[in-house]
Amino acid sequence: MRGERLADTPRWGAQQAKISSSEPIFLTEHVVIRLNAQFTRLVQRSPKSSTMNSISFNSKQNQTLALIGRILIAAIFLVSGLGKLAAPGATIGYIGSLGLPAPMLGYVAAMTLELAGGVLLIIGYRTQLVAILLAAYSLITALIFHHALGDQNQMFHFLKNVAMAGGLIQVAAYGAGGLSLDSRRETSVAPTTR
């Protein structure tokens, strides 16, 4: 490998590797060893990490990321709920066109769950319960309203709902994080010992 041109190695094919000059790069054993050592240092496990590819954040960063995640997930429910509130006739008509019973009741239930669930998810109140309810709602609506998987648009909405349910299940599994009302409730209720 000493003095071998990178462009001549079978791994790189006919491409000629260049940095910024017009001269081809030559790999020496020394360069390869140094690159390998640097790469190894980058992928080594950190002392606190249990997996090689985990990212370590401090507590404040984790709390902020959890809040951002809740806001991003809740956004679609809030937008959808506000859309239902702004145009009830369209939603009720669509529910009725599918032959579902009590379109008005379905409309009120969907709008209430989307608006209340979105707000509760953002503020982090009863987050695990809210996340489970919204995940179930996402899956049910995917099956009822987006089951025509031959239509690319409906398949996209079906998969979107499934992905939303997956994110919500993550929230249910790991909780709201430190920047939430759930966290404040847990810290304000001290365990009683007798």
Image (spheres, rainbow, N blue to C red):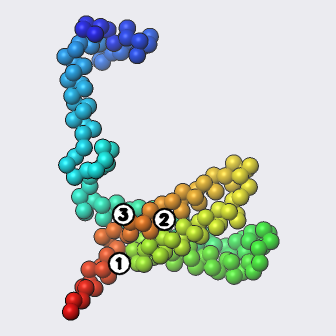
* Viewer-side label of 1, 2: 2
Residue visible at 34% across and 60% down in the picture: 65
In depth, the one of 48 and 108 nearer the eye is: 48
- Evaluate whether residue 24 shows in this view: no
Asked whether, in this view, residue 133 is left or right of residue 145, the answer is left
Q: Name the residue under label 2.
A: 168
Please provide percent x and percent y for residue 59.
Answer: 24, 62
Looking at this view, name the residue that lies furthest to the bottom: 194
Q: Relative to 64, is 189 above or below?
A: below
In depth, the one of 71 and 167 nearer the eye is: 167
Residue visible at 41% across and 78% down in the picture: 125
- Evaluate whether residue 190 shows in this view: yes
| Residue 181: numbered disc | 1
Residue 187 sits in quarter? bottom left
Label 1 to label 2: alpha-carbon separation: 17 Å
Mark 2 falls on what kind of element? helix
* Viewer-side label of 2, 3: 2
